Image: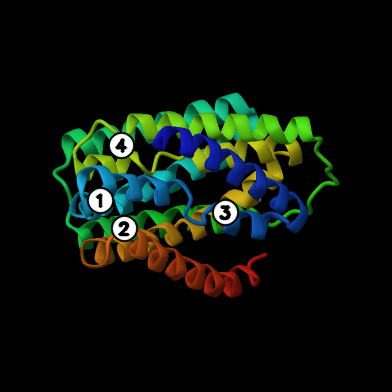
C-alpha cells in the first residue's frame, strides 16, 4: 500500500510541480519541488507499522540524508552541460558513495550533529553554485506538454520514488532516515526540467533546490518532536504547516536571488 501510494501521489505531485515550475520559473520550481511529499508518506507508514517512536527516531538521519542530497544536486549542476546521462551517473554515484560512508563507516550522529553537518554542506554547496559557478536564474521557454507527456512524467517520477520507498523498508531507523531521503523527487525534477527547459533552467532550479532543501529539515524536526506525543496524523499536519510557513518566509529571500 505504501509503495502504491508513493507511486501514485509522487507521480502526480512531481508532474504537477514541474508543470507549475515551467509556468512560474526556476525560483518557484525550486521551492515547490522541495515541499514535503515522499517523506510525509514514509513517516506516516513507519508510524502505523512500527510505531510513532520508530518514525520519530528515523528523523535523526534525515539531516544527514539531506546533506548528501545537496551534494547530489551540486554534482548534477556541475556535470549536466556535458550530458544528462553523465550528470545522473555522476550525481547518483556521489550520493551512493556518501550514503555508504555514513551508513557503514561513521557512527550515527546526534540530532544536533546531523543538523550541523547539513548546515556545513548546505553553505558549501550553495556558495559554490552562487559564487563559484555563477549560476543565475533563467527565463523559462514556452512549453505546452501534451497529456501523453504529462503521463510519462508521472510514470517516470512515480516509479523512481516508489523504488526508493521500497529500498527504505529494510533498514534500522537511522539508516532508514538516510535512505528515505534518496533524491527521487530531486532527480525526477531535474531530469524533467533538463529535457523540457534545458540545462541552464535545470541548473538555476538546482540552486534553489539546494536552498529549499532546508525545508525538509524543518518538516523532519517538527515530525520527530510531535509524533510520539500527538500521533502520526496530527504530527504530520503540524509538520506540514511548519513547512508551509518556512517556505513562505524562504520565498521572500529567494525573490532577491538573481
Residue position marked by numbered label 4 in the rendering: 99
Distance of mark 4 from mark 1, alpha carbons?
20 Å
Going by the image, does 150 lie left or right of 61? right
Residue 207 bears which disc, if any? 3
Q: CA distance from mark 1 to mark 3?
A: 30 Å
Q: Residues within 10 Å of mark 1 (few under 14, many from 20)?
A: many
Quick one: quadrant of the N terminus? top left
Which residue is under mark 1? 55
Q: Nearer the viewer, residue 237 or 203?
A: 237
Q: Nearer the viewer, mark 1 or mark 3?
A: 1
User: What crowding class fits label 3: few (fewer than 14 Cα within 10 Å), some (14-19), or many (20 or more)?
Assistant: many
Q: Is residue 90 above or below residue 234?
A: above
Who comes first in sequence, dot 1 or dot 3?
Answer: 1
Sequence-wise first label, 3 or 4: 4
Q: Residue at x 65, y 42 (%)?
A: 15
Circles 1 and 3: CB atoms closer than 8 Å: no
The label number, if any, that marks residue 232 in the structure image? 2
Pointer 2 local density, CA inside 10 Å: few below 14, some 14–19, many at least 20: many
* Mark 3 vs 4: CB contact within 8 A: no
Query: SS at mark 1?
Result: helix
Amino acid at each position: 500500500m505504501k509503495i502504491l501510494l508513493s507511486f501514485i501521489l509522487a507521480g502526480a505531485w512531481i508532474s504537477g510541480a514541474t508543470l507549475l515550475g515551467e509556468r512560474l520559473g526556476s525560483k518557484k520550481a525550486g521551492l515547490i519541488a522541495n515541499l514535503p511529499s515522499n517523506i510525509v508518506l514514509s513517516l506516516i507508514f513507519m508510524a502505523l507499522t512500527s510505531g510513532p517512536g520508530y518514525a520519530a527516531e528515523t528523523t535523526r538521519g534525515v539531516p544527514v540524508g539531506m546533506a548528501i542530497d545537496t551534494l547530489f544536486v551540486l554534482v548534477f549542476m556541475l556535470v549536466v552541460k556535458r550530458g544528462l546521462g553523465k550528470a545522473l551517473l555522476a550525481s547518483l554515484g556521489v550520493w551512493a558513495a556518501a550514503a555508504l560512508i555514513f551508513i557503514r563507516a561513521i557512527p550515527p550522529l546526534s540530532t544536533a550533529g546531523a543538523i550541523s553537518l547539513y548546515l556545513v554542506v548546505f553553505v558549501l554547496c550553495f556558495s559554490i553554485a552562487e559564487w563559484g559557478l555563477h549560476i543565475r536564474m533563467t527565463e523559462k521557454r514556452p512549453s505546452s506538454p501534451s497529456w501523453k507527456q504529462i503521463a510519462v512524467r508521472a510514470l517516470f517520477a512515480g516509479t523512481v520514488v516508489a523504488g526508493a520507498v521500497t529500498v527504505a523498508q529494510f533498514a534500522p531507523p537511522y539508516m532508514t532516515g538516510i535512505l528515505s531521503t534518496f533524491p527521487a523527487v530531486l532527480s525526477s525534477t531535474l531530469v524533467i526540467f533538463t529535457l523540457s527547459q534545458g540545462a541552464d533552467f535545470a541548473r538555476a532550479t538546482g540552486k534553489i533546490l539546494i536552498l529549499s532543501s532546508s525545508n525538509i529539515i524543518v518538516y523532519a524536526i517538527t515530525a520527530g518532536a510531535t509524533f510520539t506525543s500527538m500521533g502520526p496524523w496530527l504530527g504530520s499536519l503540524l509538520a506540514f504547516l511548519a513547512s508551509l510557513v518556512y517556505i513562505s518566509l524562504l520565498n521572500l529571500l529567494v525573490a532577491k536571488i538573481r
